[in-house]
Image (spheres, grey):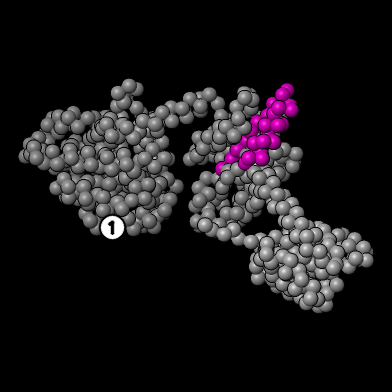
């Protein structure tokens, strides 16, 4: 059984006999530290990091007396909350008053009476610890704003007392705050949180209820008196960036209009935070309302999450292949493996819904591995049946690179299915390269050394494409076809596409354009020298059996 640690008391007394007497009274119940004067007492506070529950202080001492010591303690943020009981002579009323006015909490008279000393000490320590517990419940230690629990309590009371007033709960969080901590350090992250807290207080004029909920999440409730604008929240974000001397702090806000007061306050805040999360990744979008549409979307997403494990176990996910064609002879040269989800009750599910959701919750790594294995099994089947060795590209998400031994898993699959590395092309989005370039470079370089062909997907959709391209280990660019999907085509768009294609060829990179839907687009791509395409003009993604028929039709039959 572990013994409870004794509370620590600092006894400050210059008279050796009195000091010994106090220590004898206190030692059975407390861990006692002794000091002969105020200067020694300050050294003891520094030595123990202020970890004292109580200080017993004589006023009249040499070197540094009790009044000087009280003044020093009162000015020190770490020590000022430690209660001080002053010891005085029976006739020392003036000393008692002076000590109390300097910050002492209580006094005891000399000569010392053991039971009086023990009761005064126990009562003072109990009062201090009770106050600390209340303060810890009510306030966030870092920012000074209300804690989550106390905020919810106060907001509940406010709503009950003002049934006729309209209120909004506004919550925010900082995008990629963990990255801020990793790059600038935890202390810099804490300073930013304190800046956000001050901004909340200033914007609400200190009259509203504000809380530091958790990590980078904040909340406040304000009376609904105006409509919110993007400029308002963008201005707050800009101010925080200026104050923090960085340019990469992005905040998102969610607003819950309080209509149903039977909803628990914590759930109201959860809804506001969900609204904030719903716009992550949307450029120049700073706030969103929680509404029925968002609620319906969230319920749908929750259903998907509830069924994803069983769907994978029951192989409801199916591999589809989208053909890639060579422009010079319209010959089938490969495919991209995509995943489709055919739920037995709901029917086909849109990848545009479940793929981003799985990327957010991390399930994408398991789904990717499922797709890789199914793809390898298909290519092995082609090999056994004498069908041509067409390369197939698979998607590799940034989570795969960051959270698994990617090279080990992929080479294991090749060994299992008896395939050469060049048969499995790996598509990695441009945004993954930009977000954490060195880790991507290291991982992809190793994969290329093992013989894998690397395709940079969605090239042209990011902000740093040309700047980053010369550093990136890549074999093929897959062009983002937003440049040519507008009709009619503009000369500028055409020249941008030509420039990128020529640049790729100068770097000995292949070019694949995806999303080709019309003959006009195809001709423009042919004219600028793009060698391979994929898109609905040739074929939508199809089940494996249908793809094998396309192989037959295009002359890619048995060897």
Identify which residue is drawn at 34% across, 35% down.
309
Q: Is residue 220 above or below residue 297?
A: below
Q: Where is residue 358 in the image (x, y as percent from the top left)?
A: 38, 38
360 relative to 522 in the view: left or right = right
Q: Where is residue 504 in the image (x, y as percent from the top left)?
A: 31, 50
Identify which residue is drawn at 17% across, 50% down.
415
- The quadrant in which residue 103 appears is bottom right
Identify the residue position indicated by label 1 in the image.
446
Q: In which quarter of the image is the C terminus?
A: top left
163 relative to 371 in the view: left or right = right
| Residue 167 covered by magenta stretch | yes
| Residue 9 covered by magenta stretch | no
- The quadrant in which residue 217 appears is top right
Would residue 479 be seen by someone viewing this image from the given angle? no
Q: Residues within 10 Å of mark 1 (few under 14, many from 20)?
A: some
Which residues, given as a range, are shown in magenta? 148-173
In this rendered view, identify the residue nearer to me: 87 or 431.
Answer: 87
93 relative to 308 in the view: left or right = right
In this rendered view, identify the residue nearer to me: 123 or 232.
Answer: 123
Would residue 420 be seen by someone viewing this image from the given angle? yes
Identify which residue is drawn at 28% across, 34% down.
313
Numbered-mark total: 1
**Disc 1, SS:** helix
Identify which residue is drawn at 66% across, 39% down.
151
Q: Position of residue 177 (x, y in %)?
A: 53, 49
Q: Position of residue 71 (x, y in %)?
A: 81, 65
Q: In this view, does 556 lie above or below 119?
A: above
In this rendered view, identify the residue nearer to me: 202 or 541.
Answer: 202
332 relative to 301 in the view: left or right = left
User: Farthest left residue?
Assistant: 559
């Amino acid at each position: 059984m572990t013994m409870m640690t004794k509370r620590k008391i600092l006894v400050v007394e210059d008279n050796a006999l009195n000091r010994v007497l106090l220590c004898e009274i206190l030692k059975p119940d407390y861990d006692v530290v002794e000091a002969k004067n105020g200067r020694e007492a300050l050294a003891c506070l520094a030595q123990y990091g202020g970890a004292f529950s109580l200080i017993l202080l004589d006023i009249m001492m040499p070197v540094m007396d009790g009044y000087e010591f009280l003044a020093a303690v009162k000015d020190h943020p770490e020590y000022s909350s430690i209660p001080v009981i002053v010891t005085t002579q029976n006739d020392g009323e003036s000393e008692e008053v002076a000590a109390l006015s300097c910050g002492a909490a209580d006094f005891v008279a000399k000569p010392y009476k053991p039971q009086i000393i023990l009761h005064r000490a126990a009562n003072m320590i109990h009062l201090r610890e009770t106050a600390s517990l209340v303060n810890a419940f009510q306030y966030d230690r870092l920012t000074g704003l209300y804690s989550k629990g106390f905020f919810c309590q106060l907001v509940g009371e406010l709503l009950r007392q003002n049934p006729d007033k309209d209120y909004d709960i506004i919550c925010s969080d900082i995008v990629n705050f963990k990255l801020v901590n990793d790059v600038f350090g935890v202390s810099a992250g804490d300073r930013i949180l304190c800046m956000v807290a001050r901004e909340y207080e200033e914007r609400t004029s200190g009259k509203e209820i504000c809380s530091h909920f958790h990590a980078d999440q904040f909340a406040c409730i304000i009376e609904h008196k105006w409509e919110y604008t993007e400029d308002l929240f963008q201005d707050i974000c800009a101010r925080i960036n200026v104050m923090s001397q960085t340019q990469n702090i992005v905040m998102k806000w969610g607003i819950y209009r309080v209509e149903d007061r039977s909803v628990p306050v914590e759930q109201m805040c959860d809804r506001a935070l969900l609204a904030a999360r719903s716009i992550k990744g949307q450029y120049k979008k700073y706030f969103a309302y929680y509404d029925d549409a968002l609620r319906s979307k969230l319920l749908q997403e929750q259903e998907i999450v509830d069924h994803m494990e069983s769907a994978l176990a029951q192989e409801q996910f199916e591999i589809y292949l989208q053909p890639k064609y060579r422009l010079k002879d319209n010959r089938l040269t490969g495919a991209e493996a995509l995943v489709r989800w055919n739920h037995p009750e709901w029917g086909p599910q849109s990848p545009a819904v479940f793929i981003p959701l799985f990327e957010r919750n991390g399930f994408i790594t398991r789904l990717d591995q499922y797709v890789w294995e199914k793809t390898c099994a298909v290519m092995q089947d082609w090999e056994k049946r004498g069908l041509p060795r067409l390369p197939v590209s698979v998607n590799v998400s940034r989570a795969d690179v960051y959270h698994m031994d990617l090279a080990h898993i992929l080479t294991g699959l090749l060994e299992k299915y008896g395939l050469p590395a060049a048969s499995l092309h790996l598509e990695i989005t441009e945004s993954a390269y930009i977000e954490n370039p060195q880790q991507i470079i290291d991982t992809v370089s190793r994969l290329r050394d093992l013989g894998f062909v690397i395709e940079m997907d969605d090239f042209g959709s990011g902000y740093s494409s040309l700047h980053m391209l010369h550093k990136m280990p890549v074999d093929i660019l897959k062009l983002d076809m937003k440049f040519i999907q507008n009709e009619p085509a503009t000369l500028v768009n055409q020249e941008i596409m030509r420039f990128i294609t020529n640049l790729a060829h100068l770097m000995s990179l292949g070019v694949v354009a995806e999303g080709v839907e019309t003959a006009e687009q195809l001709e423009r791509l042919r004219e600028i020298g793009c060698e391979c395409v994929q898109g609905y003009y040739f074929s939508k993604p199809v089940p494996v059996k249908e793809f094998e028929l396309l192989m037959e039709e295009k002359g890619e039959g048995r060897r």
